Amino acid sequence: MLRRIVKSIVCILVAFGASAAGAQYPEKVITMIVPFAAGGPSDTIARILAQTMSASLKQQIIIENVGGAGGTIGAARAAKSDPDGYTLFVHHIGHSTAPALYSKLTYDPIADFEPIGIINDGASTFVSRNDLVFKDFKEFLEYVKTNKDKVNMANAGVGSSSHLCDLLFQEALQTKVTLIPYKGTGPAMNDMLGGTVDIMCDQSTNTTPHIKGGKIKVYAVTLTKRLGSMPDVPTADEAGLPGFSMSTWHALYAPKGTPKPVIETLVKALQTALKDANLMQRYADLGAEAVPQERATPEALAAHLKSEIDRWGPIIKKAGVTVN
Ligand code: MLT
């Protein structure tokens, strides 16, 4: 409670300051917190966005990776940052699943943040290390079921999109495997490339370069439509897990109390970035899709975040994986 009172006072002071200086915002370097390790899919989405937004803001945006606990450590850091427009936060679907997964969350995904807009929709991919070769997704599934006590599946911690996919995957297959948490799927990918991680359900923004480079094997994508960047890879729904569907969306936030003129400047910069041909192509090449302008708004993000929190709560509670 005290933290909120102090924050309100800071907000009022910042608001006076920002309204006076609002026209000059941004006057210094902006930090964009990514709640996963560098080199992973969320980091990739954020870095491409930061490079593009900084061009229209005419101000440098630096990425700060704050990994751990499925993104909740970075989210807590962002929630407690000064609401002055110089700390932003990029997170994915995990911002909506955290309340159901963590009984002692130290922040409120809605009350402690100002929504700026949704960034992209994205697919995940079922992949294996290179020397685990199956003729198709069905054979991949058979192998996992038969070798469930031996197979390990890496993710980015409870609450990450890879972990969420693991839960849906185990539920659909009625099989539990050994889940190994990392601070991000960037480091997890290093171990898959090194041969110690067997399988993953990881975002295509991370797996695509390694698939195309012949370093890992891909068997299915988690959307119910195939990716333009890998049209020969079937969906899990068509190839062996009927009804399987999971999209990983990312969005941009600021700490609660960030002055309205600053938020408006950031919304404009986000929308400009998402129309940038280079950003759109780089996202598409990695299987991600920049959202249309009407979804890159505070209102659209607020509504989507609320609906996702409501949607995933019962699914997670049923899976019985809440972390104390
Ligand atoms: C996830 O699994 O949530 C993300 O892939 C983590 C990451 O970006 O490293």
Image (spheres, rainbow, N blue to C red):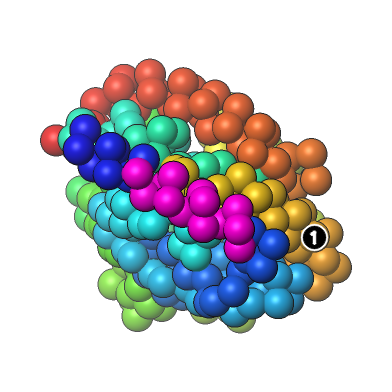
252 to 51, vertically: above or below: above
Image quadrant in which the C terminus is located: top left
Residue type beneath disc 1: Thr
Q: Say if residue 245 shows up in the picture.
A: no
x%, y% of residue 167? 36, 37
Q: What residue is at 49 percent from the left and 65 percent from the top? A: 86
Horizontally, residue 50 falls left or right of residue 280, namely: left
Image-quarter location of ligand 1: bottom left
Q: What is the span of residues highlighted in magenta in the rendered image? A: 9-21
Image quadrant in which the N terminus is located: top left
Q: Can you tell which quarter of the image residue 135 is in?
A: bottom right
Q: What secondary structure do most residues of the magenta stretch adopt?
A: helix
SS of the residue at dot 1?
helix
Q: What residue is at 36 percent from the left and 40 percent from the top? A: 8
- In the rendered image, residue 19 lying in the magenta stretch gets the answer yes
x%, y% of residue 102? 24, 36
Horizontally, residue 32 falls left or right of residue 71, namely: right
Q: What residue is at 70 percent from the left and 77 percent from the top? A: 58
146 to 49, vertically: above or below: above
Q: Can you tell which quarter of the image residue 210 is in?
A: bottom right
The residue labelled by disc 1 is 272
Q: Say if residue 14 shows up in the picture.
A: yes
